[in-house]
Image (cartoon, grey):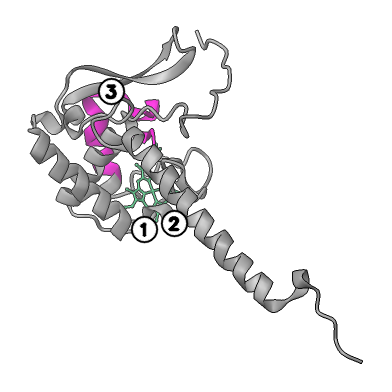
């Protein structure tokens, strides 16, 4: 008796299907990437230029959009030093590399990526726990240089280990956190509708 192999159960059919599906999804990925790039590039509508770290960042209810959103305020240079766009980019990029190099994402979440062991860092610059505007950056610096002695923990018993950052690295990390807090993350992916919110007044 000869073995009847239907076309849909043949090995060559499934091999071809695998190749076509992979190729198609690769094209979809390229299209989605090209579509998102203008929305996520620095200096675009939702992602401010790096020199935003020279300004106060607030988080306020936007009545027209019916949503909480970052507000870029008057000048308030980080550590009292106003930086050019180029120097601000270099500092924020250094901060990003420190964060990647020390794998902060192993415990924290940044812009939706990472873990849930520790607080989400996307808006940690805006955390009211840092106290008033003036002392925020100093408190953050003290914390990052010695997170065990300056633990905040919020009753969770979770303490951040001392990662022995240098002062330069910690300041760059703070610049990155300040810049990241200014990103308007509402409505991303941008072509998905935003969920209605109650006014928080
Ligand atoms: C082993 C896990 C772990 C790693 C790795 C880690 N952290 Fe943390 N981090 C924590 C925990 C737990 C807390 C909360 C405890 C606290 O605030 O005292 C915290 C708190 C923080 C806070 C305060 C957040 C807020 O708004 O209250 C900042 C900022 C922070 N970490 C930055 C970093 C950075 C930057 C890195 C990488 C250089 C890093 N962390 C790596 C565990 C970690």
> Marks 3/1: CA distance?
26 Å
Dominant secondary structure of the residues highlighted in magenta in the image: helix
Magenta stretch holds residue 156: no
Which element type, helix, strand or loop, lies under badge 2? helix
Depth check: 7 or 107 in front?
7
User: In the picture shown, does residue 162 fall above or below 82?
Assistant: below
- Residue bearing the label numbered 1: 103
Q: Residue at x 57, y 12 (%)?
A: 198
Q: Which residue is drawn at 14% across and 33% down?
A: 79
Q: From the viewer's perspective, tell me whether residue 12 is left or right of residue 99.
A: right
Earlier in the chain: of badge 3 and badge 1, it is 3
- Residue bearing the label numbered 3: 57
Magenta stretch holds residue 139: yes
User: In the picture shown, does residue 194 fall above or below 12?
Assistant: above
Which element type, helix, strand or loop, lies under badge 3? strand
Q: From the viewer's perspective, tell me whether residue 93 is left or right of residue 152.
A: left
- Can residue 191 be seen? yes
x and y percent of residue 60 in the render? Answer: 39, 15
- Residue bearing the label numbered 2: 106
Q: Give the farthest residue toward the bottom.
A: 1
Mark 3 beta carbon near ligand 1 (under 8 Å): no
Mark 1 beta carbon near ligand 1 (under 8 Å): yes
Mark 2 beta carbon near ligand 1 (under 8 Å): yes
Q: Residue at x 37, y 43 (%)?
A: 34
């Amino acid at each position: 008796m000869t073995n009847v192999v239907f076309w849909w159960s043949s090995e060559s059919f499934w091999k071809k299907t695998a190749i076509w599906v992979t190729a198609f999804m690769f094209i979809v990925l390229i299209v989605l990437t090209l579509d998102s790039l203008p929305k996520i590039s620095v200096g675009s509508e939702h992602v401010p230029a790096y020199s935003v770290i020279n300004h106060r960042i607030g988080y306020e209810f936007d009545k027209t959009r019916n949503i909480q959103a970052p507000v870029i305020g008057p000048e308030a240079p980080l550590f009292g030093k106003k930086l050019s766009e180029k120097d601000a980019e270099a500092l924020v990029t250094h901060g990003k590399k420190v964060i990647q190099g020390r794998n902060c994402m192993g415990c924290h979440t940044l812009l939706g990526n990472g873990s849930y062991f520790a607080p989400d860092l996307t808006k940690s610059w805006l955390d009211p726990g840092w106290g008033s505007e003036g002392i925020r950056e100093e408190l953050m610096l003290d914390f990052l240089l010695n997170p065990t002695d300056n633990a905040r923990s919020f009753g969770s018993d979770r303490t951040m280990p001392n990662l022995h950052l240098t002062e330069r690295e910690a300041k760059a990390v703070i610049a990155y956190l300040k810049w990241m807090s200014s990103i308007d993350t509402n409505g991303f992916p941008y072509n998905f509708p935003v969920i209605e919110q109650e006014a928080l007044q």
